Amino acid sequence: MDIDVLGALDVRENGMSVAPTAPKPRQVLALLALHAGRVVPVAALVDELWSDRPPRSARTTLQTYVLQLRELIGTALARDPGPAGGDGQRRRTAKDVLMTLPGGYLLSGDDVSSDIRAFERMAGTGYRAMDAGDFAGASRLLGAALDLWSGTAFADVQQGPQLSMEAKRLEESRLCALDQRIEADLRLGRHRELLAELTVLTSRYRTHENLHAQFMLALHRSGRRGEALGVYQRLRTTLVRDLGLEPSPRLHRLQHSILAAADCAPVPSAQSAQSARHAQPGPAAEPGPLRRDRRLAQAS
């Protein structure tokens, strides 16, 4: 079974999509796919579908949605019925894939492949490469992880409280991976290559301090000091107007460094990359400001 949720929802069995078009059954499948291999309680599914106002027929209606999903799964299984009879193995049925268990339902399947799990695995390896000073490896791994995204998570699924929360969590994970991939590219001296991307990102995340700091560094290192200072001024105006906040002390220090034409974060050489990372961490390496950026990004 192949599960994609980092963009439009698609769940495939034997290469055939089993995702329904009707909003409610699609919502049920999305939550089951998110927790593939684990039991999703009936109460969680009811809460996702109707929040705090479930109809009296909620459980019966949920069972109907499950039956609709099993019909789609059964059609997909019929394309490859598998072994039967002589070798002692029975053919898989839709109930083997979408199982009813005490208290809930479980989406199972042979060799489940999930884009969420692939993203988290590659991103984790990229973070470890970053910690080891392997900036080229970190950029490559984090870039590959980000390439798994084709849009916002569950982009075409009606979202109740649980899917909405998971979509926000996944978006935060994507932003962290993006932040670290850009940091790795800055360490590799790819500041000019980042300018177009950071122009778009700072327009989208208008109060995200790390992205603005990275944009300022990329512009400054490209010889565009005035534009780098302009980025700071726009960020400050937005923070003061929308949130009543001044930029963090780190951003203020960066502004002063650029004003003085000081190279505040030189790209380390291959020999000194590890020591430079610990001695002069880049914007994404400071956990405190990053947590502040996460809160600010949600308000943008």
Image (cartoon, rainbow, N blue to C red):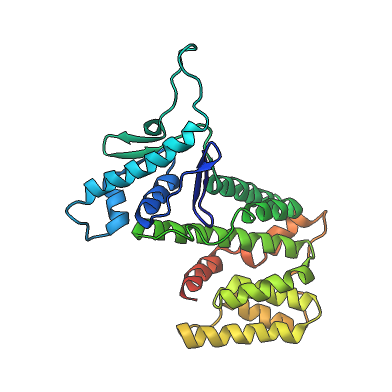
Return the residue nearer the eye: 49 or 92: 92
> Is 151 left or right of 92, judged from the image as shown?
right
Return the residue nearer the eye: 180 or 174: 174
Residue 200, by quadrant, is bottom right
Does residue 264 appear in this view? Answer: no
Number of numbered callouts drawn: 0
Does residue 284 appear in this view? Answer: yes
> Is 239 left or right of 49, judged from the image as shown?
right
Q: Position of residue 221 (x, y in %)?
A: 79, 75
Which residue is depicted at the point 68% across and 63% down?
183
Quick check: 127 above or below 286?
Answer: above
**In the image, farthest residue toward the top:** 86
Q: Position of residue 27 (x, y in %)?
A: 38, 53
Q: Position of residue 78 (x, y in %)?
A: 47, 32
Quick check: 186 above or below 89?
Answer: below
Return the residue nearer the eye: 57 or 267: 57
